[in-house]
Amino acid sequence: MTADLSRPALPLRPELVGLEPYGAPQLDVPHLLNVNENPYAPSPQVVADIAAAVADAAHGLNRYPDRDFEALRADLAAYLAAESGVALDVSQVWAANGSNEVMLHLLQAFGGPGRTALSFAPTYSMYPEYARDTSTAWVAGRREEDFSLDPAAARAAVAEHQPSVVLLASPNNPTGTALPAATVEVVLAAAAEVPGGCVVVVDEAYGEFRRRGVPSALELLADHPHLAVSRTMSKAFGLAGARVGYLAASRELVDALRVVRLPYHLSAVTQAVARAALAHSAELMAQVGSLRDERDALVVWLRERGLTVADSDANFVLFGMFSDRHAVWQGLLDRGVLIREVGPPGWLRVSVGTPQETRAFQDALVEVAGL
Ligand code: PMP
């Protein structure tokens, strides 16, 4: 191919050449069970309160928003205290446009050229992208066959690679599996030995869906200043469209994130929407309970039909094994049910929907996979 000299080459960073933007297909089909959204739209009361809060914020939109969003951080601290029993100061809470941006802030502050971020695959596919975008080297250790993390292997990986950031999703995407507190503690201890320091990020985007008895890493914060626990309003709160993620950590760690954020990164509208929704957290959490029940029933249903299903503490289920998973995915799509072709070969992931959506998924799967 000859170069078109009338068009100067763009100086694209070499590591970006040929890459496609990340994202699942956004298709217009009746049953969207592919991106782990909450299937329940905000109730009329929540909508009314959000609309009133946005109208109020609109009066001041000629001004930049509260740069440090202290009111929102206080509301998030109060929510986390109610949800997990862990008391936090406002200075220990941070937020951004989705937990994706929270984690980008973490890599901007603690990654960078000459440094390494470590995680354990299969895991959330955005992690290597945060690393790439911050010129941080990326290393993925392995999870076990059942997607658990062997503490000794995790300790050895930290010692070998000396990362400055470890990313642990718990519950993990796409597997749904959560980590025992003991495993997180082993990683925290190994990270404390890394010369120059190492931040351990526990990504609890699906934390509210954990089964009873599964602890949150928030409980470990008091003793570990190098721990950050990331959460989101996209899943449990059903607010994916608002783009609000947040984290809890030591004050020192949060102060580092304040250095790398763009000024006024959280719009006044976003802050108003988040606060209005947080005022309804009790009602929204009741919905989380029914989604958990729906998830547990779906796991049982799939296992009863002879499928292999990963334990799930999230609002989705990874199941298989299929010799031609793409054919199953396509067959479901042909029947109006969009799920996700993700995870190790042979597995598929379905988000937990309303009971009607779950039934549509089950009916389609029975037909397609001949269960
Ligand atoms: N972490 C995990 C494990 C996820 O699955 C997702 C979204 N799918 C995110 C973080 C990011 O979510 P958001 O930016 O909407 O908060």
Image (cartoon, rainbow, N blue to C red):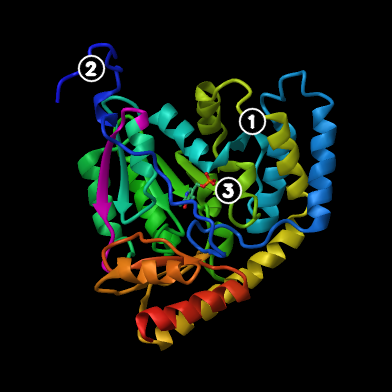
Using the image, determine if residue 136 lies above or below residue 344: above
Q: Check if residue 293 falls in the magenta segment.
A: no
Give the distance between the C-alpha atoms of the residues marked 3 and 1, in whole angstroms. 14 Å
For label 1, the SS is: loop
**Contact? badges 2 and 3 (CB < 8 Å):** no
Q: Is residue 263 visible?
A: yes
Using the image, determine if residue 252 lies above or below residue 357: above
Q: Amino acid type of disc 2?
A: Asp
> Viewed as shown, does residue 311 lie left or right of 161?
right
Magenta-highlighted residues: 133-145
For label 2, the SS is: loop
Give the x, y percent position of residue 73.
68, 37
Q: Residue at x 29, y 37 (%)?
A: 163
The residue singled out by tag 1 in the image is 266
Q: Mark 3 near ligand 1 (CB under 8 Å)?
A: yes
Name the disc covering residue 79, or none.
none
Give the mark nearer the N terminus: 3 vs 1: 3
Q: In the displayed image of the protein, which residue is found farthest to the left?
A: 1
Give the x, y percent position of residue 371.
38, 86
Which residue is more in the foreground, 117 or 215?
117
Q: Residue at x 32, y 69 (%)?
A: 327
The residue singled out by tag 2 in the image is 4
The residue singled out by tag 3 in the image is 232
